[in-house]
Image: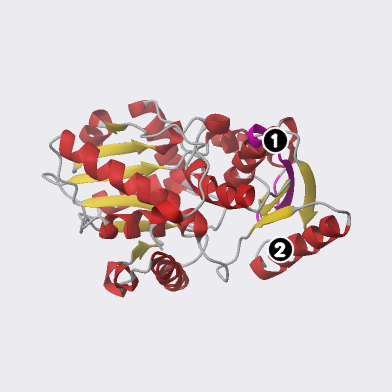
Amino acid sequence: MPLEDFPRVRLAHAPTPLEPMDRLSAHLGGPRLLVKRDDCTGLALGGNKARQLEYYLGEALAREADTVLITGAVQSNFIRTAAAAAAKLGLTCEVQLEDRVPGQGRAYHNSGNVLLDRIFGAVIHTYPEGEDEAGADAAMEARAEALRAAGRRPYVIPLGPDHPPLGALGYIDTAREIIDQCRHAGAAPDAVIVPSGSAATHVGTLGGLRLLGDRTPVMGVCVRRDKTAQQARVFKRLSDMAAMLGRPDLAQRPDITVMDDVLAPGYGLFGAAVREAINLAARQEGLLLDPVYSGKAMAGLIHLIREGFYQAGQTVVFLHTGGAPALFGYEELAT
């Protein structure tokens, strides 16, 4: 099915800028670094999820839904952006916050994205398990069934990999923008760096490049699962997206590259490498990264440069997925 045949509602301010990171490049002494500013998509303080929601909510409106349901971590950027988009489109939004990150304090559970969820008027539910995608999706489906029984028309944005990756289609635009902007800047990228969690951003960017005939490698930095598990997830989601588009040739295992060197101590947690990455981006380039996705991706890029994987004379594009509101849930970053 051609991309233009999928229902879509425009939410993101696009194209987002592609900017040089000259000071950070000089500081690291490695390749030329460019940043794709998907933190500047506009809706609800920006971030990559606006692109994904264009297709989910396009389908929701096509089905005449009146309520959107979504599940995710307590400090989920996806939930925050979905709540904002629902408000903009006149839809009720019910969200489910999963307890994925143990041992967090009051700020984590009340500030940052959670505060914005409430401001956008989302109805908030909780789910006690953090590593149970199927259970979290089932809880949302049960809530949707209750809403249907009450005469509502709910639309569920699923979390698990057993559903078509509709949102990944939004990142085909990102791939097109990267190609066009690099050409205009006279840059030939040797790699694109993305955080790899649910895998929608990774799959959409990689599949989009290949769909457009571009062979630039895409490196996914693991933010939730180890390398082996994430490679399998990315391949499945890429295969699913390729099938949706009627282009099975897009799904090639050798195209899938991930690294988990900066994953520890786990999802939503961070160590010295991520703290350094957040501080370097802020103090060298004035960029705000979050410790869950964009900060971990930057830590992965820095690690690869220091290991000699990317070197002087090359050009690397860093996909900044946003997430700045989550910083306010991590007061320890400032200590």
Which residue is at the front of the view, 90 or 200?
A: 90
Name the spot of residue 323 as percent of width and height, x first. Answer: 52, 39
Q: Which residue is mark 2?
A: 136
Quarter of the image where the C terminus is located: top right
Q: Residue at x 54, y 58 (%)?
A: 266
Q: Can you tell which of label 1 and label 2 is closer to the viewer?
A: 1
Please state which amino acid type lies under the numbered disc 2. Answer: Ala
User: Is residue 137 found left or right of 258 in the rendered image?
Assistant: right
The answer to whether residue 61 of the structure is visible from this angle is yes
Which residue is at the front of the view, 120 or 290?
A: 120
Name the spot of residue 28 as percent of width and height, x first. Answer: 24, 39
Name the spot of residue 140 as percent of width and height, x first. Answer: 74, 60
Q: Which residue is mark 1?
A: 90
Whether residue 151 is situated above or below residue 87 in the rendered picture: below
Magenta-highlighted residues:
87-104
- Residue 224 is one of the magenta-drawn residues: no
The answer to whether residue 195 of the structure is visible from this angle is no
Which residue is at the front of the view, 124 or 239?
A: 239
